[in-house]
Amino acid sequence: ANERTLSIIKPDAVAKNVIGEIYTRFEKAGLAIVAAKMMHLTQEQAEGFYAEHKERPFFNDLVAFMTSGPVVVQVLEGEDAIVKNRDLMGATNPKEAEAGTIRADFASSIDANAVHGSDSAASAEREIAYFFNDGEICPRG
Ligand code: CMP
């Protein structure tokens, strides 16, 4: 089905200057960028976005990392966009990510893992609405 998913290029990948290379992977896989913004997340924004991980031992490090520098947030649209984006990203831990995936190629640790992508339709809906209002999304076709 045609779907939308929320993607974040994290501070490590922005610092490595690979925004364009990551966008190229999305586009070559048939995903269209239908909304995008660069932002430096506040503590409150990062905590709210990752609220489901609040009780996890890595939560504080995650929030510290995600607020350590600018990120690029985008909505990707296309056939099976949620799973397609997760396949492009590879495993959360770059050491376990398959060769040729974004995390295998650009990430250095489970914290600095280059990208985030929604893990389900329900997450995608919540995460897209967290960063974009309807008027900021520009569907194709
Ligand atoms: P992300 O997809 O952005 O969602 C939560 C993030 O927490 C995850 O990517 C990782 O960067 C980070 N994280 C750190 N440690 C862990 C862990 N043990 N399990 C899952 N995610 C982790």
Image (cartoon, rainbow, N blue to C red):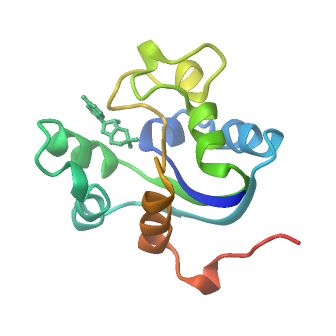
Question: Residue 33 lies in what quarter of the image?
Answer: bottom right
**Residue 125 percent coordinates (x, y):** 49, 67
Q: Residue 19 vs residue 133: left or right?
A: right
Q: Residue 27 vs residue 50: left or right?
A: right
Q: Residue at x 73, y 75 (%)?
A: 138
Q: Residue at x 15, y 52 (%)?
A: 54
Q: Quadrant of the C terminus?
A: bottom right
Q: Residue at x 52, y 75 (%)?
A: 132
**Residue 51 percent coordinates (x, y):** 23, 58
Q: Quadrant of the N terminus?
A: bottom right
Task: Residue lying at the far front in this picture: please name it.
Answer: 1
Residue 104 in the image: above or below residue 2: above
**Foreground residue among 54 and 3:** 3
Residue 124 in the image: above or below residue 129: above
Q: Residue at x 82, y 39 (%)?
A: 28
User: Where ligand 1 lies, by quadrant?
Assistant: top left
Residue 65 in the image: above or below residue 78: above
**Residue 133 percent coordinates (x, y):** 53, 82
**Residue 53 percent coordinates (x, y):** 21, 48
